[in-house]
């Protein structure tokens, strides 16, 4: 059993095959395990310093990744009486300009998520100010550095990492000697922040940040990274040479630094992705399939055209020696992949099925081909839209519907009621006009935006020959903050999912399995379903009542060829129908509110390219040639 399987971390860079890693790395199964270990390290350091009669000086980050650490520390404070009175904190950064009470302020974030719940003396809390006049910024940054030195320096600094490889707001190009300063934000960073600010145009262009040199002065550093979207940049920071293009790579020069990664963020490490390159491996079925696929794509051959020399020239001697001849191995892998191809007639027939869609378009974007086939097979399909998706609707879409209602209102209601309707419409217009940029919509505007998403969702599934009666809008409470950052999954959210499971008793459920969703909603919906399934199985212990879980991926990425259990071929007509369904989501068409930092393609383009790309890869391996294909993972347990 691997350390990931057991839930225990690897022993840093002493893990077998980690010789390419220039920084110690610990890998955990789940983000919560990672967060708990960091919280325990902070707690033990606090106690060590207290025993020595000294204070402990912490450097702290913001963002979604460290929230779990703060939650564990708060729990330790309340349940274990962990005393924070000897703690001094310095935060890494703050947007500029930014008032402390702004919705996106890191002052507000830290107080809401940590400081207001523990007993750190207020005088010991330091967060860079974003509301000072520009002429005073340089002097202020010098004073921030002075305060850190006066406190004795940072004992422990916790870091996250941006997708451009930045630490703090030290964007690509930042030098190793830099100190606390005002910096212009990189385009990728601004796009990543756009969701919190309700649009890229509202994101401040600058920020105050500790410098790389300030960070490296800390006595101990922990960098935490979660999610597959962080995997490529983490690999570069750990395995490649230090460069100012990836400021996190400068951490290689620190004497006491450890990267804490969840399993998803570790997938690009050489020892994880292609372990045979760096160490002897025990060849399992899963690893053998992955290696043969990798080899075929490296040498540009179909699997059945690989020869023994290909194996020996690419670090796969041990795999070749395990088999009487490599032809038999290649045939076995080829047949394993071929059996994963499922045509419509191989899919569920006349069964109860629930498709869980985190947002009101994930169903058609991610599994439009499958949805079409399930309906074709006369299954009883219910699409459960878990959140209302309102934060992703532009104000301009609401104004368009307001204008429509102003012009068409008389067609739907009597003349006496038209004036009342116009008053309500005017109230909505006023609410949007008076809202400052980057602030939360009124409840009425949020509701209208939700109805826009709901109507589009129904139009989308109508392309698949479903109707309003097949759609369920769960409107889960965790999402209803009016902001991109959501509340934790609560018992009410779980109960909503449990209720539909018990009502439908489905034979199959489809769940978004891409835990790297930049917004976090997919991840949280997954956890809600996971908890609901645990309770469902307690209430209904008979195994025959337990649904098969099909995991699909969203707009961001597709399942890897070796990890997928099912490939669903799609004809050109199938793909065109899927794209037509995606087009029905007009508020997300042409320009989506939160498209992600790296990808300028529309969602329908991503779906098309991803599905055609999967088919092309299968064809390159020598499998039948399809126009497009979707990929799925099937499990019994989440």
Image (cartoon, rainbow, N blue to C red):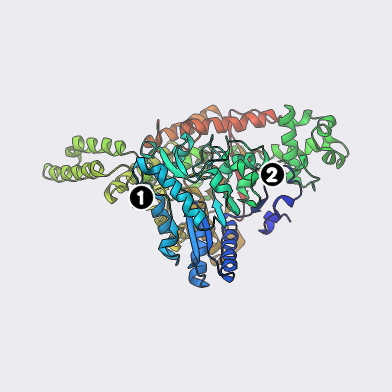
Where residue 404 sits, quadrant-wise, is: top left
Secondary structure under the numbered disc 2 in the rendered image: loop
Residue 326 rendering spot, x and y as whole percentages:
84, 35
For label 2, the residue is 22
Q: How many marks?
A: 2
In the image, what residue occupies the spot 44% across and 46% down? 141
Question: Viewer-proximal residue, 326 or 85?
Answer: 85
Q: Earlier in the sequence, mark 1 or mark 2?
A: 2
In the image, what residue occupies the spot 61% across and 56% down? 637
Circle on res. 103: 1
Residue 156 rendering spot, x and y as whole percentages:
57, 56
When the figure is inspected, residue 409 is found, relative to residue 507, above or below; the finding is above
User: Is residue 56 shown to the viewer in this render?
Assistant: yes
Question: Viewer-proximal residue, 456 or 207?
Answer: 207
Where residue 307 sits, quadrant-wise, is: top right
| Quadrant in which the C terminus is drawn | bottom right
């Amino acid at each position: 059993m691997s350390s990931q399987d057991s839930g225990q971390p690897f022993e840093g860079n002493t893990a077998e095959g980690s010789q390419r890693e220039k920084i110690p790395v610990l890998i955990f199964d789940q983000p919560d395990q990672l967060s708990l270990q960091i919280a325990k390290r902070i707690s033990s350091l606090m106690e060590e310093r207290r025993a020595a009669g000294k204070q402990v000086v912490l450097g702290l980050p913001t963002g979604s990744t460290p929230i779990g650490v703060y939650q564990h520390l708060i729990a330790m404070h309340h349940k274990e009486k962990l005393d924070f009175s000897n703690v001094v904190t310095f935060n890494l950064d703050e947007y500029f300009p930014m008032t402390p009470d702004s919705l996106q302020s890191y002052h507000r974030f830290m107080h809401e998520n940590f400081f207001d719940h523990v007993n750190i003396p207020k005088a010991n809390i330091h967060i860079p100010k974003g509301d000072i006049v520009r002429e005073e910024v340089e002097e202020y940054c010098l004073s921030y550095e002075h305060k850190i030195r006066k406190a004795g320096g940072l004992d422990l600094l916790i870091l996250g990492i941006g997708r451009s490889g930045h630490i703090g707001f030290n964007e690509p190009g930042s030098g190793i000697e830099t100190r606390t300063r005002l910096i212009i934000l990189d385009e990728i960073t601004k796009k990543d922040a756009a969701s919190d600010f309700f649009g890229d145009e509202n994101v401040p262009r600058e920020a105050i940040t500790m410098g790389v040199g300030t960070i490296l002065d800390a006595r101990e550093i922990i960098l935490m990274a979660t999610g597959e979207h962080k995997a490529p940049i983490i690999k570069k920071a750990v395995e490649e040479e230090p460069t100012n293009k990836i400021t996190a790579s400068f951490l290689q020069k620190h004497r006491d630094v450890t990267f804490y990664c969840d399993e998803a963020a570790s997938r690009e490490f050489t020892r994880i992705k292609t372990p045979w390159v760096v160490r002897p491996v025990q060849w399992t079925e899963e690893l053998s399939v992955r290696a043969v696929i990798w080899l075929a794509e490296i040498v540009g051959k179909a699997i059945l055209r690989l020869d023994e020399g290909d194996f020996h020239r690419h670090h796969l001697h041990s795999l070749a020696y395990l088999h009487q001849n490599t032809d038999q191995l290649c045939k076995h892998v080829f047949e394993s992949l071929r059996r994963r191809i499922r045509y419509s007639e191989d899919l569920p027939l006349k069964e109860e099925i629930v498709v869980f869609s985190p947002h009101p378009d994930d169903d058609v974007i991610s599994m439009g081909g499958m949805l079409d086939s399930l309906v074709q097979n006369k299954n009883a399909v219910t699409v459960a839209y878990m959140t209302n998706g309102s934060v992703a609707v532009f104000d301009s879409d609401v104004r368009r519907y307001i204008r429509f209602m102003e012009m068409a209102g008389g067609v739907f209601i009597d003349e006496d009621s038209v004036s009342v309707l116009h008053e309500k419409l005017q109230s909505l217009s006023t609410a949007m006009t008076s809202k400052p940029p980057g602030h939360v919509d009124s409840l009425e505007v949020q509701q209208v935006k939700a109805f826009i998403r709901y109507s589009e969702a129904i139009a989308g599934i109508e392309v698949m020959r479903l109707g309003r009666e097949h759609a369920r809008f769960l409107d889960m409470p965790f999402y209803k903050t009016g902001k991109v950052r959501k509340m934790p999954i609560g018992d009410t959210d779980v109960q909503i999912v449990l209720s539909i499971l018990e009502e439908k008793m489905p034979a199959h459920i489809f769940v978004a399995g891409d835990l790297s969703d930049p917004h976090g909603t997919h991840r949280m919906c997954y956890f809600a379903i996971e908890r609901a399934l645990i309770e469902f199985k307690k209430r209904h212990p008979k195994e025959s009542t337990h649904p098969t879980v099909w995991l699909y991926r969203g707009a961001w990425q597709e399942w890897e060829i070796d990890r997928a259990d099912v490939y669903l071929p799609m004809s050109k007509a199938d793909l065109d129908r899927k794209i037509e369904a995606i087009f029905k989501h007009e508020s997300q068409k042409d320009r989506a509110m939160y498209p992600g930092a790296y990808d300028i393609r529309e969602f329908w383009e991503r779906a098309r390219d991803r599905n055609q790309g999967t088919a092309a890869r299968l064809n390159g391996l020598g499998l039948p040639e399809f126009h497009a294909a979707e990929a799925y993972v099937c499990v019994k347990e989440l």
